[in-house]
Image (cartoon, grey):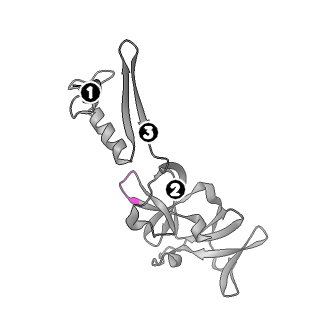
Amino acid sequence: MSDNDIRNLIFAQGFSTNEKVTDISGRGVGMDVVKTKITALGGTVDLISEEGKGSSFIIRLPLTLQIIQALLVEVGSETMAISLGYIDRVIDYEKDIVKKTNNKEVIIYRGNVIPFVRVNEKLGLKESENDKKYIVIVKSGEKTVGLLVDGLLGQKEIVIKPFGKTLQGLKEYIGATILGDGLVTLILDVAALV
C-alpha cells in the first residue's frame, strides 16, 4: 500500500468512528460522511500528515457556493429567498400607493417614481389570499424596484446552490437552497427582475 492509500483509510466507512463516546470521539459521524458531504458539494478533502509533526485536513469548496443572508418571502404558495444585499427596505403594501404610467405600475419611494413588480405575475404563480402583503424595495446597480410579495417569513443565512444544466434557463433565479426543514427554496435574481 502506498502512503497515500494508507492516509485515505481514514475516509473508509467505519474506520474513524468509535463505539464509546469520549471527549474527542464517538459522535457517530465518521470521516467517510464528512468526505461524502464535501464531495456532494463539488469539493475535495485531502489529508497531509507528517510523522512527528501532525496532520492537516485541507477542504476545498468551489467558489460557486456562497453563503448569504437572505429574506425568506412568500410568493403565491411558494417560499423564495431574496439576498439582503439587494434590499433597501420593506414597506407595507396598500393598493392606493400603486399608480399607472405608460401602462406600467409604479410607486413613489423617497420622492422617486420606481417600477412596481408583482412577483407572482412575473413568475406565473397564483396570487395568495393574504390580506397583508409587502413591498420589498430592492436595488441593483442604479435601478430601484418595488417587489410585491405575499408574506415575510424571516431572515436566514443560506447556501446558494447553482442550478445544473437542465435548469440554467430559469433567468429569474440565481439558484436554490435547502432550508433546515428540507424545503428546497428558489433564490430570486434581483438583477433579472429590475
Give the image location of residue 31, x and y in percent. Answer: 30, 33
- Furthest-right residue in view? 111
Q: CA distance from mark 1 to mark 2?
A: 36 Å
- The Cα atoms of the two marked residues, 2 and 3, are separated by 31 Å
Q: Nearer the viewer, mark 3 or mark 1?
A: 3
Q: Amino acid at mark 2?
A: Gly
Mark 2: secondary structure: strand
Q: Amino acid at mark 1?
A: Gly
Q: Position of residue 180 (x, y in %)?
A: 39, 50
Does any portion of residue 133 appear in the rendered image?
no
Q: Nearer the viewer, mark 1 or mark 2?
A: 1
Asked if 10 appears above or below 165 in the picture, the reply is: above
Q: Which residue is mark 1?
A: 26
Total label count? Answer: 3
Q: Secondary structure at mark 1?
A: loop
> Is 136 placed left or right of 142 in the picture?
left
Residue behind mark 3? 60
On the image, the x and y values in percent for residue 142 come to 72, 64
Instruction: Indicate which label's residue lies in the foreground, 2 or 3.
Output: 3
Marker disc for residue 154: 2
In the rendered structure, which segment of residues is drawn in magenta?
Answer: 180-184
Q: Could you say which is closer to the camera, residue 128 or residue 107? A: 107
Judge left or right: residue 110 versus residue 34.
right
Residue at the spot x=46%, y=77% of the render? Answer: 125
Q: Quick one: label 3 or label 1, which is nearer the N terminus?
A: 1
- The x, y position of residue 10, in whole percent, is 27, 28
State the quadrant of the N terminus: top left
